[in-house]
Image: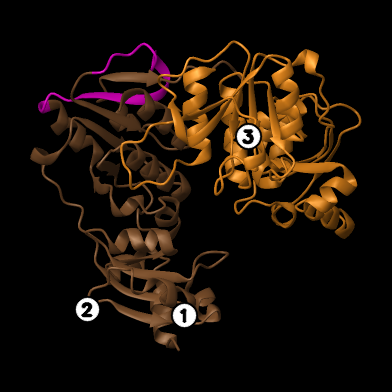
Chain colours: A orange, B brown
């Protein structure tokens, strides 16, 4: 039996305000929860159905501080954000997104104003596939601990380090470190003819407005995925991201 | 003023059963509706707010059979499928998805069991970007006239010809026409080292189960997008689609 107070706490984490207040977020489903349990994140509590406990409890690397509570399917439906609730939900501590410039890699990814949770989640999942360890986000990107982002990453959020910062300042600092920046745009040099430098940062803009003018001014190069049909306005940003990563990373 | 009967008719088109019964589907938003009006589809009626009519009616290529009805914002909210309703919605006739083998191109796309409307819509949009004119779908793919698919295509559905058929029979027929089939899988030859034949068909499987065993048996080659991280299960199918199209089409 789960208390009303706990239900209220868990459902409050659907909103950014409470995720910040409690410094926590939720993740759902066997695969995603397991990835977080096996990561550097601190899983503070787990809510699971009896069937999940029976088949997974022994094989899962819980530590003593993790309270696992059995819930009924009805209770799971109350706390879950999913249309088809899974049989396990975890409450996880947010990590501070600090980093130092000495630890960054040679191929970097920066996102400017991505607002769709599904797109951000898919981008993180794709980055993880291609071995990218860090993604840098402008302050106005959607919250990375939004439940829809967490689910769309399919567990990749437990491995890819996300850092929110002033993108303009970040790119200016990278310039001093001899990084060359490439912005994905609807005009510029074709990705199939660009030759990138060893120290590169690839910038992707928002779904509706592209890269902001503030960031656009700092870019060294604009690159585009050449289309064959003038009638099509643009590609979905997560698809464009995949194509560019496949080409360069 | 829109009648209750009309509201009932339009909202019924959210369900496949009624889309089949009335042979119609809906599209929303200035850009998407305009693309359908300028296409070979028959737009049977348009519902628009006064502001949309004032700024667009003259410039839009309506014909006499298209009834344009003014609706209030409240009425639009009632008939719209969108969380933030736009100011124009169209009811459009479904097209029959016939085709003959003599008119097909040399690079073909087939989808096997795609069930997520957002993924199917994004795939159609990406195909349109790369100039693909036809996509072949297995019978168990999500309905292409589902409102979420229509919106995610961003108007590309008005240009890309979609054909639902028995994928197995289709691939067997293509084999006789000397087409070579390539299935996107989690094992096989890297896309970066495969050299494709002039007459090629690329097959993409469902989000959760990949390509069905029935179709898998017919494939000439299995190809994969090599990942750098063993922990990641797979790529989102619409991202994988974009990467493979970018590489080959």
Number of residues whose C-alpha sits closer than 10 Å to that of mark 2, classed few (under 14), some (14–19) or many (20 or more): few
Give the x, y percent position of residue B60: 32, 68
Is A223 left, or right, of B166 in this rendering? right
Q: Which residue is mark 1?
A: B50
Q: Quadrant of the C terminus of chain A?
A: top right
**Foreground of the two, B51 or B194:** B51
Number of residues whose C-alpha sits closer than 10 Å to that of mark 1, classed few (under 14), some (14–19) or many (20 or more): some
Q: Would you say residue A124 is visible in this rendering?
A: yes
Q: Is residue A210 above or below residue A18?
A: above
**Do callouts 1 and 2 mark residues in contact (Cβ within 8 Å)?**
no
What span is colored magenta in the figure? B176-196
**Foreground of the two, B58 or B127:** B58
Q: Residue B64: give its label.
A: 2
Give the x, y percent position of residue B24: 30, 67
Q: Secondary structure at mark 1?
A: helix
Give the x, y percent position of residue A215: 65, 36
Is B137 left, or right, of A182 in this rendering? left
- Badge 2 sits on which subunit? B
Q: Residue A217: give its label.
A: 3
Foreground mark, 1 or 3?
Answer: 3
In terms of image quadrants, where is residue B113? Answer: top left
Q: Is residue B189 magenta?
A: yes
**Foreground of the two, B153 or A78:** B153
**Do callouts 2 and 3 mark residues in contact (Cβ within 8 Å)?**
no
**Foreground of the two, B221 or A16:** A16
Looking at the rendered structure, whether the residues under marks 2 and 3 are on a common chain is answered as no
């Amino acid at each position: 039996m789960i208390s009303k107070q706990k239900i209220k706490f868990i459902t409050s984490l659907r909103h950014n305000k409470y995720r910040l207040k409690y410094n926590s977020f939720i993740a759902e489903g066997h695969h995603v929860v397991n990835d977080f349990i096996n990561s550097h994140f601190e899983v503070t509590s787990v809510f699971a159905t009896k069937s999940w406990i029976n088949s997974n409890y022994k094989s899962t690397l819980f530590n003593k501080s993790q309270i696992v509570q059995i819930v009924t399917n009805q209770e799971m439906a109350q706390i879950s954000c999913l249309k088809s609730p899974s049989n396990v939900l975890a409450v996880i501590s947010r990590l501070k997104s600090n980093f130092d410039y000495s630890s960054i890699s040679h191929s970097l990814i920066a996102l400017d104003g991505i607002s769709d949770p599904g797109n951000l989640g898919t981008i993180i999942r794709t980055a993880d596939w291609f071995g990218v360890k860090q993604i840098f986000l402008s302050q106005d990107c959607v919250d990375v601990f939004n439940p829809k982002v967490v689910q769309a990453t399919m567990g990749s959020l437990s491995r890819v380090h996300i850092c929110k910062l002033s993108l303009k300042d970040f790119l200016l600092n990278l310039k001093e470190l001899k990084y060359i920046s490439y912005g994905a745009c609807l005009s510029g040099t074709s990705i199939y003819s660009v030759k990138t430098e060893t120290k590169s940062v690839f910038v992707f803009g928002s779904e509706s407005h592209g890269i902001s003018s503030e960031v656009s001014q700092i870019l060294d190069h604009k690159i585009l995925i050449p289309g064959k049909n003038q009638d099509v306005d643009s590609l979905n940003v997560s698809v464009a991201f995949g194509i560019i990563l496949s080409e360069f990373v």
